[in-house]
Image (cartoon, rainbow, N blue to C red):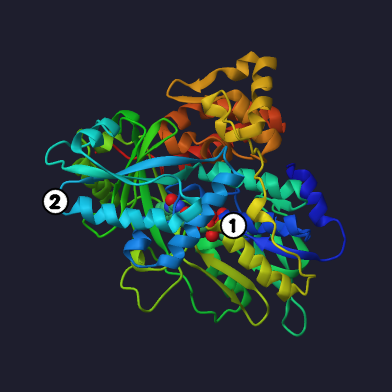
């Protein structure tokens, strides 16, 4: 993946692209993989970095959604459970089974959740990860020693999948590129082009690195801009009605000592009627989330004080050590691209199913859904787009398509496991240049080789790209990420051929971004 080569391919005169995908999140990248695997000529443009939007800010669960089961949405749960199984098969280096416990403090909870989770097992069928079981208080505490002991009656154990969202996205980008897709980050679509009869014929985009504007022709333009999809729809039809009801969700990251053991906690019903998770992730504990309706989506959303207090309060009810603001290592916020419904009374009640709409001019908008179902969304999206573009019908191949890095056995070095089969090349880089094997900060197991790799192989262009999504430093410990930023900037500048003023600008921009992840102690 070399940005300069992709840009040359786009700007070279040639026939129209079969499909032009706008948006480099799970939805858009899934479509690029699917289309390229079918042999269509596909280009994808992302205004910032791949995964900069919601797709790096999720709870990171490949799940059927116990909550949707509570809402009675059986078809959504079944579809997601099947996709969870396919994801584990196609990306075993990125997705793994995670045991969850629903702790019980009331007499009715064990039978109620015990039966509900048996139904969840049944719906998973052949794609099941493991059977749910009812646990005694002792068994529950053996799994999660830091659970609140007072009043504990036991727990129900069940299984779901966990993954690293931005690493999965980057692996999908590599999969798409290997199949011939052309992918450009820092390319913002600014205008849609139409022919006389008002049919879409292509688009105009700005290279955010140079400010230059380019045009490209495409048989079908796909709006996969997630929470921003109304903006592109308005470019197409200035009178278009908004189709989204965006809401934000916050997670906080704590030291792992708050959640001992390898089991996650699932609280099925918080004060505001939501589900809350406390999950072990990359040696830390992630706790969330909230659901707060917002007016306007932004690329760098920020947690509200009320959301932080709510998460701390809820976590404090279930953990033996009550976390406070000073314990928060990082807080990240994502925006749900929820499709509006007149019937739902809150955004938490809105459907997580995806929606495909086609405008009069032929703009295909695909929105909603979940990370877990990105493959199915892409299959549906490309099926529709191929008809719209008048392309030769070709079957979807992604059900059995291994994702870049596919490797059955995890890498020996636990910290490099998410790279799958690429881990060997990273290890070689460290052997060749031992200085690159040194951790860049004592609090995080991230080393210089990952930075060099991110620039050379994964189109990492900015400090934020490397510290937030190619490594997860910013998400795991925002202050440590800021502290390691100068060393990372030096390594990146050497790899990209940039000067000191580039490093200075990057450092100041990154500090600004990191301020959205840092929670003040009081
Ligand atoms: C708090 C939270 C937790 C979640 N947890 C889970 C979970 O555990 N499991 C699960 O399955 N799902 C989860 N989800 C849902 C899942 O994360 C989203 O459904 C998914 O990431 C949406 O992907 P997307 O590609 O549609 O949107 P995005 O990831 O936001 O991608 C859209 C992209 O379009 C780009 N863009 C916008 N305008 C333009 C333009 N003009 N030109 C070029 N590019 C543009 C943006 O920069 C952005 O990168 C969660 C969501 C939230 C908010």
| Res 261 quadrant in image | top left
Which quadrant is the N terminus positioned in?
Answer: top right
Position of 202 with respect to 468 (left or right) is right
Q: Return the disc, 2 or 1, that comes first in the chain's sequence.
A: 2
Position of 490 with respect to 18 (left or right) is left
User: Which residue occupies the foreground of this view, 196 or 376?
Assistant: 376
Residue at the image point whose x is 68% and y is 80% from the top: 361
Q: Report x, y in % for residue 498.
A: 69, 32
Front tag of 2 and 1: 2
| Res 489 quadrant in image | top right
Q: Report x, y in % for residue 332.
A: 41, 45
User: Which residue occupies the foreground of this view, 124 or 91?
Assistant: 124
Reply above or below: 496 against 432. Answer: below
Q: Report x, y in % for residue 225.
A: 57, 62
The disc at residue 107 is 2
Residue at the image point whose x is 28% and y is 34% from the top: 144
Q: Report x, y in % for residue 398.
A: 66, 55
Which quadrant is the C terminus positioned in?
Answer: top left
Location of mark 1 (residue): 375
Reply above or below: 428 against 455. Answer: above
SS class of the residue under badge 2?
A: loop
Q: Residues within 10 Å of mark 2 (few under 14, many from 20)?
A: few
Residue at the image point whose x is 75% and y is 46% from the top: 178
Residue farthest toward the bottom in the current orientation of the protein: 197
**Residue 197 visible in the current orientation:** yes
């Amino acid at each position: 993946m070399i940005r300069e080569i992709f840009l040359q391919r786009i700007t070279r005169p040639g026939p129209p692209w079969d499909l032009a995908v706008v948006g480099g999140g799970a939805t858009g990248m899934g479509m690029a993989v699917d289309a390229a695997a079918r042999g269509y000529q596909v280009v994808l443009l992302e205004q910032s970095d791949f995964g900069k939007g919601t797709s790096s800010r999720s709870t990171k669960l490949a799940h059927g959604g116990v909550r949707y089961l509570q809402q009675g949405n059986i078809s959504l749960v079944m579809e997601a459970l099947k996709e969870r199984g396919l994801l584990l098969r196609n990306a075993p280096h990125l997705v793994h089974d995670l045991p969850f416990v629903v702790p019980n403090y009331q007499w009715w909870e064990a039978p109620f959740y015990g039966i509900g989770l048996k139904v969840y097992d049944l719906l998973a069928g052949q794609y099941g990860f493991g059977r749910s079981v009812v646990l005694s208080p002792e068994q529950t505490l053996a799994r999660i020693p830091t659970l609140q002991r007072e009043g504990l009656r036991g727990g129900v154990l069940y299984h779901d999948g966990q993954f690293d969202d931005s690493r999965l996205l980057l692996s999908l980008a590599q999969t798409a590129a290997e199949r011939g897709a052309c992918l450009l980050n820092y390319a913002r679509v600014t205008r849609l082009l139409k022919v006389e009869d008002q049919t879409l014929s292509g688009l105009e985009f700005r290279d955010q690195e140079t400010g230059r504007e380019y045009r490209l022709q495409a048989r079908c333009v796909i709006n996969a801009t997630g929470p921003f999809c109304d903006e592109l729809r308005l470019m197409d039809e200035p009178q278009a009605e908004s189709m989204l009801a965006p809401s934000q969700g916050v997670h906080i990251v704590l030291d792992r000592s708050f959640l001992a053991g390898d089991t996650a906690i699932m609280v099925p019903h918080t004060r505001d009627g939501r589900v809350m998770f406390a999950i072990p992730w990359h040696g830390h504990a992630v706790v969330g989330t909230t659901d707060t309706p917002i007016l306007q989506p932004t690329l760098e959303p920020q947690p509200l004080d009320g959301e932080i207090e709510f998460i701390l309060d809820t976590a404090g009810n279930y953990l033996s050590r009550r976390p406070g603001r000073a314990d928060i290592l990082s807080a990240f916020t994502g925006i749900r691209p929820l499709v509006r419904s007149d019937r739902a009374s809150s955004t938490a009640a809105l459907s997580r199913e995806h929606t495909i709409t086609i405008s009069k001019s032929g703009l295909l908008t695909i929105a909603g859904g979940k990370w877990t179902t990105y493959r199915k969304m892409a299959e549906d999206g490309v099926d529709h787009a191929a008809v719209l573009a008048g392309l030769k019908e070709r079957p979807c191949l992604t059900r059995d398509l291994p994702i870049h890095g596919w490797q059955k056995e995890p890498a020996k070095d636990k910290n490099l496991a998410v790279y799958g089969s690429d881990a060997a090349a990273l290890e070689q880089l460290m052997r060749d240049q031992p200085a690159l094997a040194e951790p860049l900060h004592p609090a995080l197991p991230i080393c210089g080789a990952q930075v060099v790799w991110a620039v050379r192989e994964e189109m990492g262009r900015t400090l934020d790209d490397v510290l937030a999504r190619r490594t997860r430093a910013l998400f795991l410990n925002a202050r440590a990420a800021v502290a390691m930023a100068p060393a990372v900037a030096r390594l990146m500048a050497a790899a990209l051929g940039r000067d000191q003023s580039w490093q200075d600008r990057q450092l100041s921009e990154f500090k600004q971004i990191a301020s959205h992840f840092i929670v003040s102690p009081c």
